[in-house]
């Protein structure tokens, strides 16, 4: 397993144990980076207007289209490290 992948998996576990809950914008960024890092570009259609949470998640992930999975992993690791301070 690559060192980056190990660091990413560790950061994903640490994100679940943060002492303070991040704001919604940061949570969306974490979600989008995680999805981009693990699944690549967003797939499927955008949720309808009544699914505001699903729509926000989809939009956040769609903004990362084209970002490599490795770059997304590194950004996720960096963001979690900032949140732990």
Image (cartoon, helix red, strand yellow):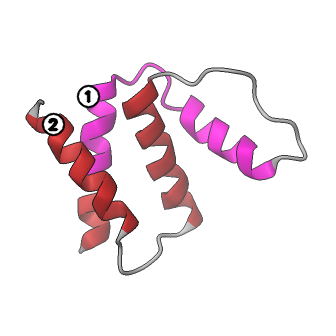
Q: Residue furthest bottom?
A: 19
Residue 78 visible in the snapshot: no
Q: Position of residue 82 (x, y in %)?
A: 27, 64
Proximity of marks 1 and 2: CB atoms separated by less than 8 Å:
yes
**Number of marks in the rendered image:** 2
Identify the mark nearer the N-term, 1 or 2. Answer: 2
| Element under disc 2 | helix
The magenta region covers 52-77
Which residue position is annotated with label 1?
Answer: 70
Which image quadrant for residue 36? top left
Q: In the picture, which quadrant includes the N terminus?
A: top left
- Residue at point 37%, 33% (across, down): 37
- Label 1: how many residues lie within 10 Å, few (<14), some (14-19) or many (20+)? some
- Residue at point 29%, 63% (across, down): 14
- Residue at point 42%, 42% (across, down): 34
Q: Residue furthest front?
A: 1
Which image quadrant for residue 38? top left
């Amino acid at each position: 397993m690559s060192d980056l992948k190990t660091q990413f998996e560790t950061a994903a576990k640490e994100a679940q144990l943060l002492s303070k809950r991040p704001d919604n914008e940061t949570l969306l960024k974490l979600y989008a980076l995680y999805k981009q890092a693990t699944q690549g570009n967003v797939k499927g259609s955008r949720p309808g207007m009544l699914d505001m949470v699903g729509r926000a998640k989809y939009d956040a992930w769609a903004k990362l289209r084209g970002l490599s999975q490795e770059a997304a992993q590194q950004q996720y690791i960096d963001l979690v490290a900032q949140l732990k301070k």
